[in-house]
Amino acid sequence: MFSAFRLTAQLARSWAASSLLQRALAPSLTRPAAPFARAFHPSLRASATLNQATRRKPRKKVKASKSPLLEGNTHKKGVVSQIFIGKPKKPNSAKRKIAKVKLTTGKTVQAYIPGEGHNLQEHSVVLVRGGRAQDLPGVR
């Protein structure tokens, strides 16, 4: 019985050595690796328990920018391409001064000119900051 056991152990060792040798010499003959590794579990993925959900922090909500053309900067330089007068929304009545400004990024934006009187004209170089005029639609 011991001799039969030794014989099978020797055969197993020689087979393992030969298979290792074959893999080293000819990697193309071996089976290719799976294209993606997937963790296998027989049951479906369960959602969090009530206790887990209450202990975890809520996910942060990403706020949309109020001035997306500034690309996260506080100010952007631009050149005035046109100046015109706009009317505010329904309950208000006035003549609001608005400038169409081409920013250094190449994008065009309508900008409100605050205050009484201005000396802006075409080709004036201006610094645009974020925010919006409350009663002027489309002007940020």
Image: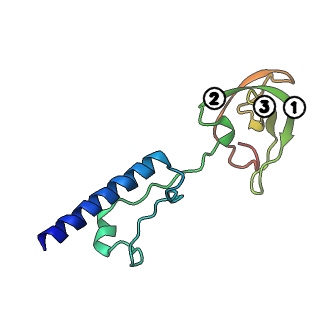
**Proximity of marks 1 and 3: CB atoms separated by less than 8 Å:** no
**Mark 2 and mark 1: span between their CA atoms?**
20 Å
Q: Which residue is mark 2?
A: 75
Label disc, if present, on residue 128 of the rendered structure: none
Q: Where residue 95 sits in the image (x, y, percent)?
A: 82, 41
Q: Residues within 10 Å of mark 3 (few under 14, many from 20)?
A: few
Judge depth for marks 1 and 3 and give the one in front.
Answer: 3
The label shown at residue 106 is 3
Q: Earlier in the sequence, mark 1 or mark 3?
A: 1
Task: Please give left or right for residue 130 compared with residue 95 in the image.
Answer: left
Residue at image point 69% right, 38% down: 69
Provide the secondary structure element on which disc 1 rests. strand
Q: Residue at x 39, y 56 (%)?
A: 19
Q: How is the image coloured?
A: rainbow
Q: Nearer the viewer, residue 14 or 35?
A: 14
Amino acid type indicated by mark 1: Gln
Question: Taking 63 as reference, is 82 left or right?
Answer: right
The residue at 66%/35% (across/down) is: 70
* Farthest bottom residue in view: 43
According to the picture, the residue beneath numbered tag 1 turns out to be 82
* Image quadrant where residue 81 sits: top right
Q: Nearer the viewer, residue 52 or 119?
A: 52
Marks 1 and 3, how far apart at CA: 15 Å
Q: Looking at the figure, which quarter contains the N terminus?
A: bottom left
Which quadrant is home to the C terminus? top right
Q: Quadrant of residue 131?
A: top right
Q: Secondary structure at mark 2?
A: strand
Instruction: Label 3, secondary structure: give it.
Output: loop
Kindly report which numbered mark, 2 or 1, lies closer to the viewer in this rendering: 2
Kindly identify the amino acid type of the residue bearing the numbered disc 3. Answer: Gly
Q: Position of residue 67 (x, y in %)?
A: 65, 41
